[in-house]
Amino acid sequence: MNARPTRGAIGRGTDFDLHDFGRPARRTRPRTKQRPDYSEAALARVISVDRGRYRCLLENSESRPLLATKARRIGRRGVIVGDRVRVVGDTSGRDGTLARIVEVMARRTVLNRTADDTDPTERPIVANADQLVVVASLIDPPARPGMIDRVLVAGYAAGVAPIICLTKSDLADPAPITRLYEPLGLPIVVSSPTCELSGLRDLLASKVTVLVGHSGVGKSTLINRLVPDADRRTGEVNDVTGKGRQTSTSAVALELPQLPGHKDDPGWVIDTPGVRSFGLSHVDPAAILDAFHDLAQYVADCPRGCSHHADAPECGLDAALGRGELSAARLASFRRILDAVDHPAHENG
């Protein structure tokens, strides 16, 4: 029986070839630049994310939600709630099955925040939202205009139309807050546990809307009323700190029920975990004025290159304040955010 030649014998005058032993030389493997074509793969919407597993719902389909992983070809790019993706594999949604996300479609909008005003890392919250509802309670915990303003700034920066929803109106007068924001001309909805939500429901129809606010302000309660089978957990407010206990631990997208007599797309709502801070280090300071367009008319009187800070000489905002045409509270809120983004601090409204 002939002995198997050693690796060293190959290439030294022998008649053997590497192919005789079933393993081609490392450099002989054919290479190709062709990549799989997934242009016909099924489209789906990501409705929740949990530890590397993505729950998706196929578009234009009555099928149940499916569970998917992210393909290696996507790389380090994150997949977030609201993303439209292409999926392959088992898309039946049956228990024990797993599909694969192979492509993330271009996002129309992305709502971001940072941990604070010193953090350079953007944290995407949701993708492809049309609207943003800033949810604030009038009491327990009380509304914080600084936080409302910050979320409005992020919404305008993302190109997402804002709405303000004030909850617990049965316990406190909404007038002071509504007066503060009426000059912006954006929708303001006032709600209580027993009130009609038809006005809010009309605003949500045919739109993808994300709800953002502090813990304990009533986001999950609103979701449960808008989507009766959502079963989102609700919590109470701490009597000592005045802050709510976070009950939603991850964002989730829910399709609104079809209204009687309506055939249009009912729309989607995205519930998000309560936030304790809303950093804006990702926002261009020049874009902050977009969230304060009640001030824009006075900025036209500013000298060229005016920073609009409190120490800016001859700022048109100060002149308007002196004439009694501008709310001191609105100007203070605007300058707090402007100072925080221009000169990062840890204040979050």
Image (cartoon, grey):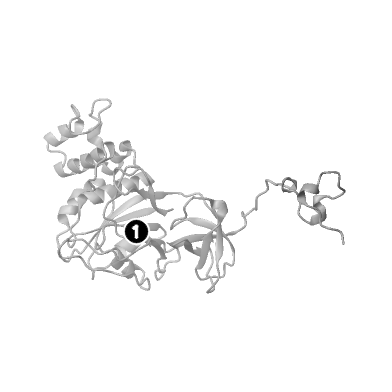
Q: Residue at 18% of width from left, 27% of height from top? A: 314
Residue 86, quarter of picture: bottom right
Q: Amino acid at mark 1?
A: Leu
- In this rendering, the answer to whether 116 lies above or below 299 is below
Residues 227 and 50: in front is 50
Q: Residue at 31% of width from left, 61% of height from top? A: 200
Residues 191 and 308: in front is 308
Residues 19 and 14: in front is 14
Q: Secondary structure at mark 1?
A: helix
Q: Which residue is mark 1?
A: 203
The residue sitting at the top extreme is 304
Asked whether the viewer can see residue 100, the reply is yes
Q: Residue at 12% of width from left, 38% of height from top? A: 324
- In this rendering, the answer to whether 15 lies above or below 244 is above
Dot 1: few (<14), some (14–19), or many (≥20) neighbours within 10 Å? some
Quick check: 115 left or right of 36?
A: left
Asked whether the viewer can see residue 129, the reply is no
- In this rendering, the answer to whether 82 lies above or below 320 is below
Q: Position of residue 226 (x, y in %)?
A: 34, 68
Quadrant for the N terminus, please: bottom right
Q: Position of residue 156 (x, y in %)?
A: 34, 45
Q: How many marks?
A: 1
Q: Position of residue 268 (x, y in %)?
A: 41, 62
Q: Position of residue 21 (x, y in %)?
A: 80, 56
Q: Residue at 16% of width from left, 34% of height from top? A: 320
Quick check: 298 left or right of 265?
A: left
